[in-house]
Amino acid sequence: MPALTIALLQLDPPGHDLDANRRAGEAACRRAKALGADIALFPEMWSNGYETAVPFGGAAENVYRHPDLWRGAAPVEVPDHRVVWRGEPVAADSPFVAHFRSLAAELGMAIALTYLEAWDGPPRNSVSLIDRYGRPVLTHAKVHTCAFSVPEAALTPGDSFGVCTLDTAVGEVRIGAMICYDREFPESARALMLAGAEIILTPNACDLERNRIAQFQSRAYENMVGVAMANYAGPGWGHSVAFDGMAFGPEGARDMLVVEAGEAAGVYPAVFDLGALRSYRRRETWGNSFRRPAVYGSLTDPAAADPFVRVTSEGRQPAR
């Protein structure tokens, strides 16, 4: 079976200029197509970027704390989302998204486009997967927003993890998505695997140090899925990475790494052997083969006990 190529668009962080971001994004997609990509994957929040958000200094770390840590501390309030996100959110049917729909159809290449999505109330941090015919086939809003800090405390979190069947030049592929902080919770990738995902796309915007990369590798290993993550370029950033999910081969343990970028901006192709991955998933023991869901009841218990209790200065706990 032919390989599936996902282009990791490791780009410089966008500023507060929607048209400039559209042009830069289009250029990156055209480069991805020239490199033979079936899917182009943007880093997180490409439409507006985090440069758009009003900086609030130390408040970013103080929205939620352990109750003991509020003693003697001044209260912290989350500003209104219209103040935080100075850049206009864009709707799923906006000209910005429509432009990339047309581009996907022109190039015959799927595009995983990220944007600050206009919503009823605070906006969402979203990725829309547009197929090679220009049709949106999946939209995922970040479920685990960084609600402990501004600016993401001023977002509406998503409420599900969806999977779609993507028609590509190499056949149909089951694709899921999670965004940045979502990947730090094993339940995110597990839910996507259980929904049938073979490949998980992950837009990202943070420093990808070795522990986070190892964590991402674990998501591939434990679920027997391919994972691809695109991050912003720059010192302390970069390291967009992909793992193929196949930890063992005929010779024993193998390196699952497909590609890892450095810190420089660029388009980095990640090639996945779907035939090998599907064969591996049929014969190996991870994923959903030997799970025992009947004993996992505590995973859906919304209560938090010490030392994991976090509250606002008014005593409100994070939504669960």
Image: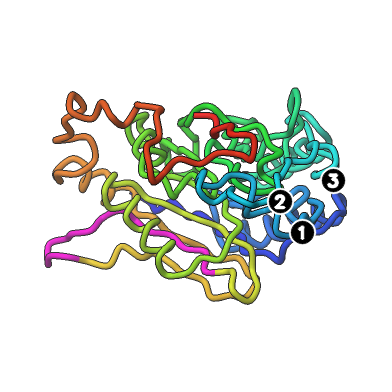
Mark nearest the camera among 1 and 3 is 3
Relative to residue 5, is residue 263 depicted above or below? below
Mark nearest the camera among 3 and 2 is 3
Magenta region: 239-253
Task: Answer with left or right where residue 286 lies relative to residue 2.
Answer: left
Give the residue at mark 2. 46
Mark 3 or 2 closer to N-term? 2
Element class at badge 1:
loop
Image coordinates for residue 133, horizontal then vertical, percent: 63, 35
> Could one spot residue 22 in this view of the protein?
no
Give the residue at mark 3. 87
Which residue is located at x 65 percent, y 73 percent? Answer: 234
Asked if the residue under mark 2 is in contact with the one under mark 1, i.e. CB atoms within 8 Å, the reply is: yes
- In the drawing, what numbered circle is on residue 14? 1
Image coordinates for residue 152, horizontal then vertical, percent: 66, 44
Label 3 neighbourhood size at 10 Å, few (<14), some (14-19), many (20+)?
Answer: many
